[in-house]
């Protein structure tokens, strides 16, 4: 008599086993895993560690940390005179940069897009080159330009019959000197962005304005300028953020002491001094978070400002 084997109950596989048994399901995760691993190691973990460090203070070079709570933030906001100097310099530097660079960049962009100009590519390259130079290079060039003994600024003053000025010896010259360097470095960069924005304006709009008898100034004022407001918004927001991160030029140009009478401190130079000069890593991290908060506030305010103006014009 032949015996018949009765199969036993099949063991159900878990959802995890089913997932790994199907190669089409887990292969895409394998390819994106390097990004998430590097992001977690080099971005997410340092950011979370910085949040904790803002409420701690390092104990010398021992590698140990002491929990201080909000003491770092309170000190930065109330008991640190350099923070007040850095905030004032940031406001003056940002306002001066936008007030001098944006109008000149706009007129330079109009000039570099003029049909009568020859060699547009060469001129655009020449004006753009300073923006790709390292900040250390700009600081060294600025130090030579404003040198009391052999600087070009004093040579120009002497040739015009004026006296030599110790540009680095007086606090009132710190921001103007830095604004001159920033103008040379970034004005051409802003002009390139405006040129890109102008290339997006349809030729039929300009041709219709010409047919209606609009002059070159009227076309620039009433047609090109309003259409470039998104570009101006981008430039002003990035310029303000760049002013917050200003480090190489003032560090090289003014030195580690903050310039004349210590009036040349910026946020990044102060953070560097606290972190690596006095080894107060926790306090420097707290200042960094305050700078981040300032950047967020300024960005939101500028976005609302530009949106309000655009909405007002559309309503009209």
Image (spheres, rainbow, N blue to C red):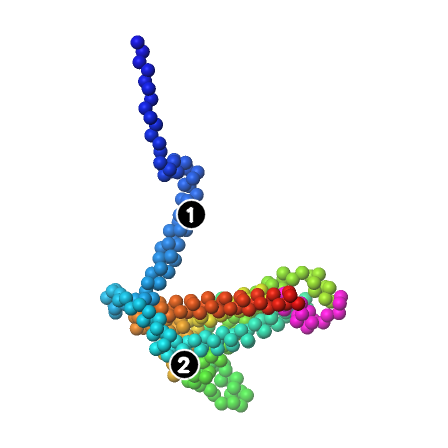
At a point 33% along the width and 22% down the height, the residue shown is 7
User: What's the magenta region?
Assistant: 211-227
On-image quarter of the C terminus: bottom right
- Is residue 214 shown in magenta? yes
Residue under pointer 1: 32
| Front position in the image: 198 or 123 | 198
Task: Provide the major secondary structure of the magenta segment.
Answer: helix
| Residue 255 is covered by the magenta coloring | no
Q: Residue at x 35, y 36 (%)?
A: 14
Q: CA distance from mark 1 to mark 2?
A: 49 Å
Residue 167 point in image, percent of width and height: 45, 83
Query: Does 243 sit above or below residue 12?
Result: below
Residue at 37% x, 60% y: name it: 47
- Residue 19 image offset from top left, x and y in percent: 39, 38
> Which residue is outermost to the left?
62
Is 310 situated left or right of 11 in this image? right
């Amino acid at each position: 008599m032949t015996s018949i084997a009765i199969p036993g109950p099949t063991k159900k596989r878990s959802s995890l086993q089913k997932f790994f048994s199907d190669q089409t399901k887990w292969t895409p995760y394998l390819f994106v895993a390097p990004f998430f691993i590097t992001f977690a190691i080099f971005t997410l973990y340092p950011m979370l560690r910085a949040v904790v460090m803002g409420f701690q203070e390092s104990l010398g070079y021992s590698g140990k940390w002491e929990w201080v709570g909000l003491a770092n933030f309170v000190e930065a906001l109330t008991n640190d005179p350099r923070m007040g100097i850095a905030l004032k310099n940031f406001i003056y530097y940002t306002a001066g940069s936008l007030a001098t660079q944006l109008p000149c960049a706009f007129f330079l962009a109009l000039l570099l897009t003029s049909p009568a100009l020859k060699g547009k590519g060469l001129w655009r390259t020449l004006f753009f080159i300073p923006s790709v130079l390292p900040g250390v290079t700009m600081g060294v060039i600025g130090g030579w330009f404003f040198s009391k003994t052999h600087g070009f600024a004093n040579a120009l003053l002497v040739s015009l019959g004026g006296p030599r000025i110790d540009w680095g010896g007086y606090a009132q010259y710190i921001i103007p000197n830095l604004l001159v360097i920033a103008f040379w470095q970034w004005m051409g960069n802003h002009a390139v962005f405006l040129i890109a924005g102008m290339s997006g304006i349809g030729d039929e709009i300009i041709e219709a304005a010409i047919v209606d008898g609009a002059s070159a100034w009227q076309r620039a004022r009433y047609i090109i300028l309003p259409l470039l407001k998104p570009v101006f918004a981008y430039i002003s927001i990035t310029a303000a953020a760049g002013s917050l991160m200003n480090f190489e030029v003032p560090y090289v140009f003014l030195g580690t002491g903050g310039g004349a009478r210590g009036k040349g401190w910026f946020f990044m130079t102060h953070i560097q001094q606290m972190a690596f000069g006095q080894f107060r890593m926790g306090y420097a991290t707290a200042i960094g978070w305050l700078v981040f908060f300032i950047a967020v506030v300024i960005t939101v305010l500028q976005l609302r400002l530009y949106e309000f103006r655009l909405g007002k014009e559309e309503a009209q």
